[in-house]
Amino acid sequence: MDSGPVIHTELVTSTDLLSQPWLPDLTRMINASYMVSHTDKIKYLDNKVRLRTDSELSEELGADGFTAVAFASGDADEKVQVIGTASVKPWKDDGLWNPLDHDDTSHDPTTEKLNSEMEQIVRDHACPGDYELAVVALPPDPRYRGKGIAGRLVKACEDEILRRRRQEGDHERPVRVMIRVSKENAGDYWLKQGFKTVGSRRCPKGFWDSLEEFTMWAMIRELHPQ
């Protein structure tokens, strides 16, 4: 009886990523994942491309970043497939967030009475964090969706974050893992994964190759070293 493909994961630093023979397959899988839009509430360009070169992911992650990659292998003669990825990089906050999802609230006349100082607080809201979870992607193949692969990859990334924190001798301070997502398309999913919304902003048409405006959420999940 066929038990299906064997799935395993690997962690790779951003530098080592460049020398992996499967890097072109990873790039193609990520781009294929980001082109899937049949379930999206916010529509994107049909030719949307997440990574334009094989080296772009490594460059985006920076020297301290890393990626987790899932592979599926079947028969000995069958080529190993890249079937998922999740990456981590240092969080960089530009401070241009609205608190929570302030920009989603209906018009409130009280808002117009805010003094200039309060208006500045509403407009410019920092979302401090330590790491950013990025480029979480699965191929547009029903064999690998809804199987918990993304969750497994995220867990591998979080375990590596905690390992690094313990290696630094810090066993007390929680680690703040951030993620930026389209509220309309992915907000509910990440809420179910235990992330909380800490900031939002309206993004114009064209941002992330979108065909309309959308709300970007900054979300956080704290990890606690043991």
Image (cartoon, helix red, strand yellow):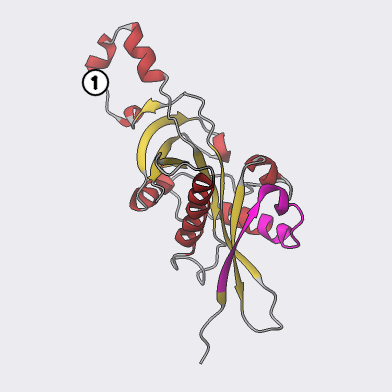
In the image, residue 127 sits, relative to residue 54, either above or below, namely above
- Left or right of 77 on screen, residue 31: left
Specify the segment rendered in magenta: 7-27
Task: Tell me residue 18's x, y (percent).
Answer: 75, 52
Task: Tell me residue 167's x, y (percent).
Answer: 54, 47
Residue pointed to by mark 1: 108
Q: Quadrant of residue 139?
A: bottom right
Secondary structure of residue under mark 1:
loop
- Left or right of 183 on screen, residue 142: right
- What residue lies at 68% left-to-right and 46% top-to-bottom? 58
Looking at the picture, which amino acid does disc 1 mark? Asp
- What residue lies at 69% left-to-right and 83% top-to-bottom? 76
207 or 16, nearer to the observer: 16
Crowdedness near tag 1: few (<14), some (14–19) or many (≥20) residues, C-alpha within 10 Å: few
Task: Tell me residue 206's x, y (percent).
Answer: 56, 34
- Left or right of 142 on screen, residue 46: right
156 or 184, nearer to the observer: 156
43 or 78, nearer to the observer: 78
Is residue 22 a member of the stretch shown in magenta?
yes
Is residue 61 a member of the stretch shown in magenta?
no
